[in-house]
Image: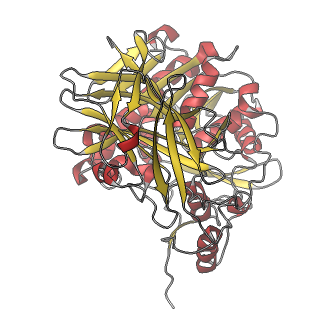
């Protein structure tokens, strides 16, 4: 019987690299490629530790290494423990701090190393940088974590009565990528109940299961991913935070940047580069992505993308690893304004940015016709309601949120659903530039014990098409109507062009990217029965429902 899944195995080590099996403190050996500059002199090393096959085209390090070695850096790329050519159990997350420390120790003992090490990379290989920072190795002098966070495997974030909605993408990821040393691709059957059965069905098909999944579902089990303490409590190192406005990890990535920018000892060496890209480095200027601009399949597009991908990091390392440039030559913040080009500023939000509120009105009819977003605060209480049906949820706008801009869909149809409250501004004759955080302030009641709230801010064009600017979501534990909640929608740099208008959609589902709320008090992973619930959004003069924007220029 043929297998109904794809198994991704290792690709050949390129001729430009030399592979070593580097021994860790417990005797496990990790497969490690070394690319050296041509001059043969001891050099600063840039380390990358990843689980996606160090030699795959997907991570394109053969091409990246050519760029780094031309600038005089040794590049070291390693399969993490339990993945592809490396030995050890496939667990994920656990062990990265110690393995990072031991790998740096090995690097500085090599004749081609001058004893200075930096780290670079995206997503999980951004997390391995934070893990190495937590270990406190003195040779680690600077890091460039891209589209990532220190929070990749921690208890869901909570602020007051608002918690992160469980992200089903995480369970999908750890089940397909961390079952064993390879990567698997197989469609999930989201119709199975309970939700745990969706993944049990996958593991039965694969014949293996994921330890990282088992410590996440159906109950979160804390793991010692930072055995020496949280990275923020370690010896400070210069950090270039590389963030994508359309990245599905942008909210948690910006939490790291904001926290360290305010932390004594760290603040002076925090830098930010933010672009209008998603997790897979697709750019707004090309979205939706045609084949000629798809770096996933087109080598010419890859060459163009790698310039944006590597240049900020190389300039940063020239300052903090090589010391051949002064720190004053680096912009503290380099950011892209969607539809408005690249900018530099001394801080984020940039000087001149100010807070602006757009208040939700016409709430009672917003599930039938458009409500309004306006600068006028409400003078009396307003309320509107919508029905949440766990058997008729809003389908997530793209099947792969990591490559959101690859499709960059028109989301105008969602506003016409009866389980969505939708609000719009009037079109403006002037551009409106967003540069900073966006939040939604709302008071919500529910007939369920708790509720999920999803908010999307869209750019609606004159032809009626509507595409995402930012989004946020939260689980509201207090649904009594007595407390106002803040839904964190992340940061952005985005120009709303003349003739366009803002549209805000508020709903209770976004499946299967996010968890289905059963409408009951049961663990949503284990629930087999669901119950409809009625949500009500309330705006009062003393607690107005509002979209809080950060706007550049006059308001």
Q: Is residue 78 above or below residue 546?
A: below
Q: Quadrant of residue 359?
A: top left
Q: Residue at the location (63% across, 22% down)?
A: 260
Q: Please tell me which residue lies in front, 69 or 528.
A: 528
Q: Percent x, y for residue 314?
A: 46, 27
Q: Please tell me which residue lies in front, 196 or 531.
A: 531
Q: Percent x, y for residue 326?
A: 50, 9
Q: Is residue 208 above or below residue 225?
A: below
Q: Residue at the location (64% across, 74% down)?
A: 200
Q: Is residue 30 above or below residue 4?
A: above
Q: Please tell me which residue lies in front, 73 or 182.
A: 182
> From the viewer's perspective, is 188 left or right of 364?
right
Q: Residue at the location (35% across, 18% down)?
A: 343
Task: Give the quarter of the figure containing the C terminus.
Answer: top left
> From the viewer's perspective, is 495 left or right of 394?
left
Residue at the outermost bottom position: 1
> From the viewer's perspective, is 554 left or right of 59?
left
Q: Percent x, y for residue 340?
A: 27, 25
Q: Quadrant of residue 308?
A: top left
Q: How is the image coloured?
A: secondary structure
């Amino acid at each position: 019987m043929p297998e109904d899944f794809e198994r991704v195995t290792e690709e050949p080590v390129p001729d430009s690299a030399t592979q070593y099996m580097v021994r860790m403190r417990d005797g496990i050996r990790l497969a490690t490629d070394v690319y050296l500059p041509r001059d043969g002199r001891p050099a600063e090393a840039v380390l990358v530790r990843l689980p996606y096959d160090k030699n795959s085209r997907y991570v394109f390090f053969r091409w990246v290494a050519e760029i780094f070695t031309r600038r005089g850096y040794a590049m070291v790329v390693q399969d993490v423990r339990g993945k592809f050519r490396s030995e050890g159990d496939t667990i994920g997350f656990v062990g990265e701090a110690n393995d990072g420390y031991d790998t740096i120790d090995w690097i500085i003992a090599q004749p081609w190393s001058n004893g200075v090490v930096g780290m670079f990379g995206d997503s999980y290989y951004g997390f391995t940088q934070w893990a190495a920072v937590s270990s406190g190795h003195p040779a680690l002098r600077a890091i460039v974590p891209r589209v990532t966070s220190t929070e990749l495997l921690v208890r869901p974030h909570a602020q007051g009565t608002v918690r992160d909605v469980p992200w089903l993408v995480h369970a999908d990821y750890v089940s397909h990528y961390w079952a064993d040393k390879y990567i698997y691709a197989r469609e999930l059957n989201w119709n199975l109940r309970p939700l745990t059965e969706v993944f049990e069905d996958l593991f039965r098909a694969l014949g293996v299961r994921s330890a990282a999944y088992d410590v996440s579902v159906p109950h979160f089990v804390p793991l010692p991913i930072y055995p020496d303490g949280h990275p923020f409590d370690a010896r400070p190192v210069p950090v270039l935070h590389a963030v994508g406005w359309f990245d599905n990890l942008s909210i948690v990535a910006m939490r790291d940047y904001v926290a360290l920018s305010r932390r004594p000892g760290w603040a002076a060496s925090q830098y930010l580069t933010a672009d209008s890209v998603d997790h897979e480095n697709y750019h707004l200027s090309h979205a939706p992505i045609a084949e000629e601009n798809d770096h996933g399949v087109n080598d010419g597009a890859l060459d163009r993308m790698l310039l944006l991908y590597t240049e900020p990091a190389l300039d940063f390392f020239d300052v903090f690893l090589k010391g051949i440039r002064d720190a004053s030559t680096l912009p503290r913040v380099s950011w892209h304004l969607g539809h408005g080009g690249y900018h530099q500023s001394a801080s984020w939000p940039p000087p001149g940015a100010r807070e602006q509120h757009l208040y939700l009105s016409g709430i009672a009819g917003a599930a039938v016709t458009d409500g309004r977003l306006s600068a006028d605060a409400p003078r009396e209480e307003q309320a509107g309601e919508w029905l949440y049906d766990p058997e008729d949820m809003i389908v997530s706008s793209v099947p792969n949120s990591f490559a959101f801009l690859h499709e960059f869909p028109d989301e105008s149809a969602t506003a016409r659903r009866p389980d969505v409250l939708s609000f719009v501004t009037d079109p403006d004759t002037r551009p409106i530039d967003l540069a900073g955080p966006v939040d939604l302030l709302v008071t919500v009641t529910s007939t369920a014990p708790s509720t999920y709230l999803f908010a999307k801010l869209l750019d609606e064009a004159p032809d009626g098409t509507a595409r995402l600017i930012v989004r946020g979501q939260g689980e509201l534990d207090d649904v009594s109507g007595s407390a106002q909640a803040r839904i964190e929608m992340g940061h952005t740099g985005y120009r709303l062009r003349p003739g366009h208008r803002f549209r805000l959609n508020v709903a209770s589902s976004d499946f299967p990217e996010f968890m289905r709320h059963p409408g009951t008090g049961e663990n949503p992973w284990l629930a087999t029965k669901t119950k409809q619930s009625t949500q009500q959004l309330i705006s009062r003069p003393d607690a107005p429902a509002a979209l809080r924007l950060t706007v550049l220029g006059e308001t």
